[in-house]
Image (tube, rainbow, N blue to C red):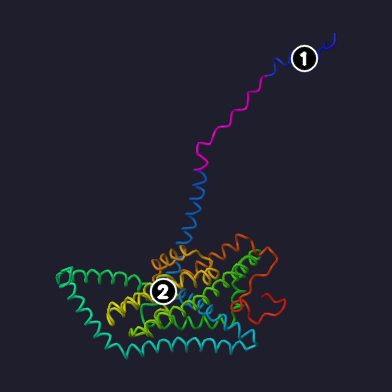
Amino acid sequence: MTGSGPDARGSFFGAFRRPVEPAPPAATEDPVPRGLRVATAYAWRLLVLAAAAGVTIWLVIQLKLLIIPLLIAILVSALLSPAFSWMLRHRWPRWLAIVVSVISTLAIVTGLLWLAVWQITRQWGDVRDRTVEATAQLRQYLIDGPLHLTATQIDDGLNQAFAFLEEQAELLWSGALAIGTTVGHVVTGILLTLFILLCLLADGGGIWRWTTRLFPRKARPAVDGAGRAGWVTIVNYARTQLLVASIDAVGIGLGAFFLGVPLAIPIGVLVFLGAFVPFVGAVVTGAVAVFVALVYNGPWIAFWMLVVVLGVQQLESHVLQPLLMGSAVKVHPLAVVLVVAGGAMVGGIPGALFAVPLAAFVNVVAVYLSRRSWESGQPPAAADLIWSTVPRRRGNTA
């Protein structure tokens, strides 16, 4: 019969004797939810980044006598970049362009400070007398006016206000004196800043090439392109901020002059310098202008001075900043406010001064790296000051 025989019997009975393999066990579920695993993965990475940022800030604080002059020199070189690169493009010798740029900058700063000191020395006595008189009148009004305050209440309020101002001044001056707590440290910082500035103007290209060689060879194109893109942003920021500061200083200074407010030139110089600290500088310098008008010219002129300050600041915030600074910095205004506040808390006045350009630099570098722009085959954007040692020619992207 078909299928009979030893083989058939063996395979038939063998099927019964063969042990049955157990079914594979069902996959056990992970006791940790996926959302928690993702959250912890992000958490430990964020902790590593926070630790790295903390170590960096600690090193900056420890090396503040070197870091702050370096940042000031970089910012000044960015301010000088348009005029300096223009001279190089027109075949000026580099040494002559350096001399003209540095001497012109020192002459402008010295001239502004001399004008401010000259007017202060001329009008300080009159302003002091009028301030004392206005303070006495205000005190008497608070006593005899509708508030009916007592002299004790006024003195207590003044003491609390002065104590608050002293606390805030301590915080700001602790950052302002980060360059040095003695005259020797300040002088050393100024000399170091000038030396770094001269080195950047003389051989910025060589310094940058040496910096890129510190990175692995495969990473150098990305570092070079990101650094160039960040530097172009810093130059645009410095140039735009210089224009905005000049417009603010001229507008508020002329307003104080036509309203008869004393110390119009020092107010303009203060507004010019304060404009380099976004938001904070405008508020502080505008308050100083209104206060001087109040104590010297009375409340009516102070009101019109306030109108002038608000008008200039509105022109800056709604016209100049969106049109000029928005394209130059590419940082949202909310981010600007937050980084300025954080920089002031960490580093005082220097922190507030360098917060926005550093944020703009980091933002542009991060976007450049995330988009892998160096792989597009196009050369990085040219920056005429730091990256080039000679005027660019056709085919020269170094």
For the residue pair 113 and 67, the one nearer the viewer reads as: 113
Residue lying furthest top in this view?
A: 1
Tag 1 and tag 2, C-beta contact below 8 Å: no
Residue 177 showing in the rendered view: no
What residue span does the magenta drawing correspond to?
A: 19-35
Disc 1 marks a residue whose amino acid type is Gly
Residue carrying label 2? 311
Q: Is residue 319 left or right of residue 115?
A: right
* Secondary structure of residue under mark 1: helix
The image shows residue 162 at horizontal and vertical percentages of 25, 72
* Secondary structure of residue under mark 2: helix
61, above or below 125, in the image: above
Name the residue rendered at 32%, 70% in the picture.
Answer: 168
Residue 120 showing in the rendered view: yes
Name the residue rendered at 45%, 65% in the picture.
Answer: 339
CA gap between label 1 and label 2 equals 105 Å
**Mark whose residue sits in front, 1 or 2:** 2
Q: Is residue 141 left or right of residue 96?
A: left
The image shows residue 281 at horizontal and vertical percentages of 40, 73
Which of the numbered marks, if any, corresponds to residue 10? 1
The image shows residue 344 at horizontal and vertical percentages of 40, 68
Name the residue rendered at 47%, 73% in the picture.
Answer: 67
Disc 2 marks a residue whose amino acid type is Gly
The image shows residue 111 at horizontal and vertical percentages of 43, 89
The quarter in which the N terminus is drawn is top right
Tell me, yes or no, whether the highlighted magenta stretch contains residue 27.
yes
The quarter in which the C terminus is drawn is bottom right
Give the overall secondary structure of the magenta segment.
Answer: loop
